């Protein structure tokens, strides 16, 4: 049984994999060690752990896990991965972006893949059919755009995602929702179309909190896969276990 720990800015998410398949996912705002203690008491056969964090190095958590679990890995630029990373600034690359690409490639081997993670920011990441991560783009997400309009103007209200957004707004609220949401849809569709001119067989994977909105709104065919990051981290974990056994 594998434990995948993804430490975000506000929450910690844990996924349990059993024989390569995702079994359970839990999220919490607890302190990381308290959360993991609860997990270990519930899932007593965990043998391997990998941790990914957007915060500082979780030294206390790692030290705790090493007293409980035989195989503990922290995902950083030094950890071997099952694809080739051609990004020029590897140390500044978000590991969540890389892990999501690894997960997408594990699910779609030998394919040209675009992973779009629609969260606080929208990230576009491209991996070619040779298993080479090339790079991508970062753009403000839905909530960030709404907050920016409110913060940097004196009169515009703070709005949020709305299922009903017009192409032509007839009042200020409609103009904001139409501008923000159509803007993102047009941006994503255009990005996909531009990449498809070079890679006609491009496979598009959508993930992140706002992925369901994009899935319903863009004109391009895409796969909605909310667990692609956890799947990628599990493949990195298994890859490193295999590397250890071969050395």
Image (cartoon, grey):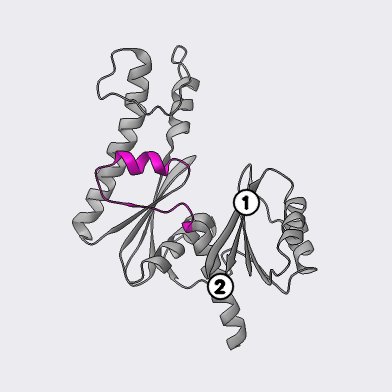
Residue 98: x and y in percent read: 48, 60
How crowded is the residue under tag 1: few (<14 C-alpha within 10 Å), some, or many (20+)?
Answer: few
Q: Earlier in the sequence, mark 2 or mark 1?
A: 2
* Residue 141 against residue 157 in the figure, above or below: below
Report the quarter where the N terminus lies.
bottom right
Compare residues 232 and 125 and report the one nearer the observer. Answer: 232
CA gap between label 2 and label 1 equals 18 Å
Q: What residue do we see at 35% from left, 31% from top? A: 181
In the picture, residue 188 is in which quadrant?
top left
* Residue 153 against residue 215 in the figure, above or below: above
Asked which secondary structure carries label 1, the reply is: strand
Report whether residue 177 is seen: yes
Tell me if label 2 and label 1 are in contact, CB under 8 Å. no
Identify the magenta region: 209-228
Residue 41: x and y in percent read: 77, 60
**Image position of 51 (left or right of 138):** right
Which residue, given by chain and number where applicable, does mark 2 sit on?
Answer: 19
Which residue, given by chain and number where applicable, does mark 1 sit on?
Answer: 26
Asked which secondary structure carries label 2, the reply is: loop
Report whether residue 94 is seen: no
* Residue 245 against residue 56 in the figure, above or below: below
């Amino acid at each position: 049984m594998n434990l995948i720990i993804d430490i975000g800015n506000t929450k910690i998410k844990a996924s349990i994999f059993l024989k390569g398949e995702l079994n359970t996912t839990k999220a919490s705002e607890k302190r990381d060690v308290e959360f993991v203690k609860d997990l270990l008491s519930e899932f007593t056969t965990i043998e391997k752990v990998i941790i990914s964090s957007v915060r500082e190095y979780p030294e206390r958590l790692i030290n705790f896990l090493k007293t409980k679990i035989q195989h503990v890995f922290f995902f950083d630029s030094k950890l071997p991965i099952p694809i080739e990373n051609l990004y020029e600034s590897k140390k500044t690359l978000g590991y969540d972006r890389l892990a999501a690409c690894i997960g997408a490639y594990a699910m779609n081997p030998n394919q040209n893949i675009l992973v779009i993670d629609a969260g606080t920011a929208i990230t576009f990441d491209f991996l070619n059919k040779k298993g080479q991560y090339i790079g991508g783009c970062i753009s403000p997400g839905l909530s960030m755009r709404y907050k920016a309009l409110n913060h940097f103007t004196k009169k515009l209200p703070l709005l949020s995602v709305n299922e009903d957004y017009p192409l032509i707004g007839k009042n200020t609220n409609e103009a904001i929702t139409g501008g923000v949401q159509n803007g993102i849809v047009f941006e994503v569709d255009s990005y996909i179309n531009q990449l498809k001119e070079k890679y006609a067989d491009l496979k598009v994977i959508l993930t992140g909190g706002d992925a369901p909105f994009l899935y319903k709104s863009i004109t391009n065919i895409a796969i909605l896969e909310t667990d692609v990051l956890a799947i990628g981290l599990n493949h990195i974990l298994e890859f490193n276990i295999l590397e250890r056994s071969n050395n």
